[in-house]
Each structure stands twice: as structure tokens, then as C-alpha cells.
Amino acid sequence: MHLKRGTVMYNGSYHQKPLDRRARFTIVFSSCLLALLFAAVTAVTLAQGLSFGIFMGEDGLPYVHVAGQVVPQPLYARAHLPEGGLTLVEVTRPSPQIVVDDSGRHALSGNEVYKKVVPSVVGVVTRYGPGSGAVTGTGVILTEDGIIATNHHVVSGAHSVTVVFEDGAEYEADILGEDYYTDIAALKINAKGLTPAELGQSEALEPGDPAYAIGNPLGLDLRNTITDGLISAINRDIVFNDSGADLSMTVIQTSCAVNPGNSGGPLCNQYGQVVGIISSKIMGDMYSSVEGLGFAIPTHIAQSVLNDLIVLGYVAGRPAIGITADTSLILDERTAAYFNLPVGVVVDSVARGTDAEAKGIRKGDIITHVNGTQVKTVAEINKIKNNYKVGDTITLSIYRSGQEFDLEIILTEAK
């Protein structure tokens, strides 16, 4: 058997051979020398104003508390101190942090958002006459005495409107006013002591912010459903084709799941504030599947519209030409070429008492340009018109029976 030097076998196992006297002396002397050297280095370090140490939290992670903030640090925390004295660095474990925005509001969990907002959410049931069906949407309580916001398309053409609360209580509602262009309507029920929603600043939203939608998807059987997601985009300009007419709206885009029945309900931020009124979504067709593309009217737009609807029944100061378009004939390039007509918008009717009537615009006229800019849709006309005020003058280029001419039209107030 070959044994390594310095070992000896006792009872079949290997043990270290006892050290001799000289070896023990060498180890003791070396240990003392190292201890003296470490003490000297520490004294010099403190004299130079440099301290160091290892700070361990309860979970084995190091933390340093500086100037009121708990900051995770590397395993070795070093502080270079200025001349004139030492600065005490408190070492502590961080307490749970609460996310707070610039206004000091505390961010809420999804459950907290739901509990805060749902008392302000109602069902809106619209009927169109005896024997007809009903449309169900959602509404948001604005005042404790029964003013409620919803969508124009939820109550448009209604014979009667009923507001339904979570406990099953029902109230007949009056329509104070509705606005086609922003898809907003204001209702009033005879009730007191309601819980109004808190409106937030939609202008403060940024893509990526948390978002929640609450409403009645597919009817009252699924009332007060909450879905979550993100603010996908802000100031999104969308052109909707509503009954053949193009309608341009500036909206908030969200990834929250919204479905028929959510219309008129709240889009909320992480503070339980209503920042938008759900209005629409993009749906798939037989060729494609679409998910997570919902849209809401921002509160900074809805609020001013609602104020006018509540007081006046219409939106004050909105300019109008005084005509409606014929949506059965869309003169795009292909259709216009087929009928040998210019591209433009066909006039269907002219409002009485307007300057458009006074200047002789009639049904069947084709508006080809506004202020020299070619137009193919109502949305394009409105985009130009909305840069002007009531009483301003715009120039319409008209095609009629093979002739083209210009008319200067004074804008009236839309009602």
C-alpha cells in the first residue's frame, strides 16, 4: 500500500499526522502577524474617511436606505465620504412600495378599480316601439341626481329608454341630447343619491398605461363585466362607415376586450377614473380574425359635449353647411368613371333657412372641392369645415348637369 506523506493509518481509516512543535509555532506566529496587519489597514482606512461593509437583508439581499429611499445595492456597499465628517448610512429592509402618480393618487388593483367604478355603471335598454326588439348598452352615472352618459348609437331612434341598475331597479329615462359626430348622448332619470363616476384626464394617458373596461357585453345577463388591458394608442384618428356615411373621430385605442353591449360604458385608468366612453371595436370578417382593437371617446372630448347636451340639447358652436349626403351613391374613382361623373359627394337634402339653401344648392348636386381641395367623402368635407367657426365662409365647388361652378356658403350652427 502506498501512503501519502504526512498521513498514517489507524484502524483502517486515514487521519492527519499530528503536527510537530515547530509547525505549531509557525502557524500561531503567522496568524498574529496577519491580525496586526488587518488592524493597521483598517485604522488607515478610517483615517482617510473611507468606510465599507456588507449589508444583508432578511432574504439575503443587501439594501441601503439613503435620503428616504430604499435602494438595492451590490453585495459590497461603499460610500466615499466628503471631508468634514462622516455621514450615517442607515441599513434597513425596504417596506412594500406603493406606486403613486404625480398627482399623489395611489394606483389601484383591478379589484379596487371594479369596486370603485361599478356603482356608477348601469345598463341602458332601448326599445323602438311595440313589438320591436331592444338594444342593450351601458351607461355611466355623471351626477347623484340621475344624469347618465352613453353612446348616441345606443339610444338613436328610441321609442323608450330604460336604465337598469345592478340590483334590478329600473328607471325610464329621458334623452337630454345626443350627438352623432362624437357618438355621445346624455340621459336623465328621476333618482337621487346615486354614485357619480370620477372623470380622469384623458390627455394624461400614454400608450402602455393599464386600462379597464366595465359594461354589459351581449346584454344584461353578463352585466358589469370587467376586462383589463392597456392603452394601446392615443389621439387615434379613425374613419367609421356609419350607414354608408364616413364619420371621422379622434379616439383612444385599447386592448381591453369590448363587445356589443359595452357601448356607452367606462374605460378606466389605474386610479379608477373614467378616461373614456367605450364606443366601438374593429371586428373580423370571413377572411381575417381581429382581437383587442377597441375604441373609446376621450373624456376631454366627451365632457364638453355632455355639458352642452345637458344644458342645450345640442353641441353649441359646431359649424355646419346645412346639407346631408346621399350615402346610396359613393362617387369614388371607379364609380365616378363608370357613370362619367366627377369624384365627389352627392347632396341628398338641404336644410331650410340655411345659406346653402339660399345660394341654391339642391338634391343631386355633387360637391367636388371645398376651398380648392378635392373631396371624396363626407369625412373629408368635415375635416376642412371643422377648421372654421359658425358665420365663417367656405367655398364649395359644385358639379350639376355637366357644369361646374363655385358657391360661397356661410356656415350655420349645427343642431
Image: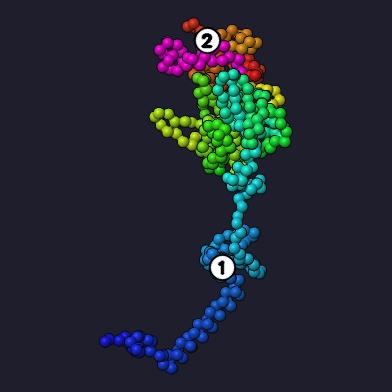
Badge 1 density bin: few <14, some 14–19, many ≥20, Cα 10 Å: some
In percent of width and height, residue 211 lies at 56, 41
Which residue reaches farthest bottom?
A: 21
323 drawn magenta: yes
Q: CA distance from mark 1 to mark 2?
A: 83 Å
Residue at 51% over, 20% down: 243
Residue at 45% over, 18% down: 332
For the residue pair 135 and 304, the one nearer the viewer reads as 135
In percent of width and height, residue 139 lies at 62, 32
Check disc 1 and give the amino acid type.
Answer: Phe
* Segment colored magenta: 320-349
In percent of width and height, residue 155 lies at 60, 24
Task: Point out the tag, 1 or 2, that comes first from the N-terminus.
Answer: 1
Q: Which residue is mark 1?
A: 55
Query: Can see residue 374?
Result: no
Query: Can see residue 401?
Result: yes
Badge 2 density bin: few <14, some 14–19, many ≥20, Cα 10 Å: some
Is 117 rendered above or below residue 182?
below
Image quadrant where residue 263 sits: top right
Determine the secondary structure under disc 2. Answer: loop
327 drawn magenta: yes
For the residue pair 101 and 340, the one nearer the viewer reads as 101
Determine the secondary structure under disc 1. Answer: loop
Image quadrant where residue 172 sits: top right
In percent of width and height, residue 242 lies at 52, 22
Residue at 47% over, 16% down: 330
> Which of the numbered marks, if any, corresponds to residue 289?
none
Label count reads 2
Check disc 2 and give the amino acid type.
Answer: Asp
Q: Quadrant of the C terminus?
A: top right
Q: Which residue is mark 2?
A: 365
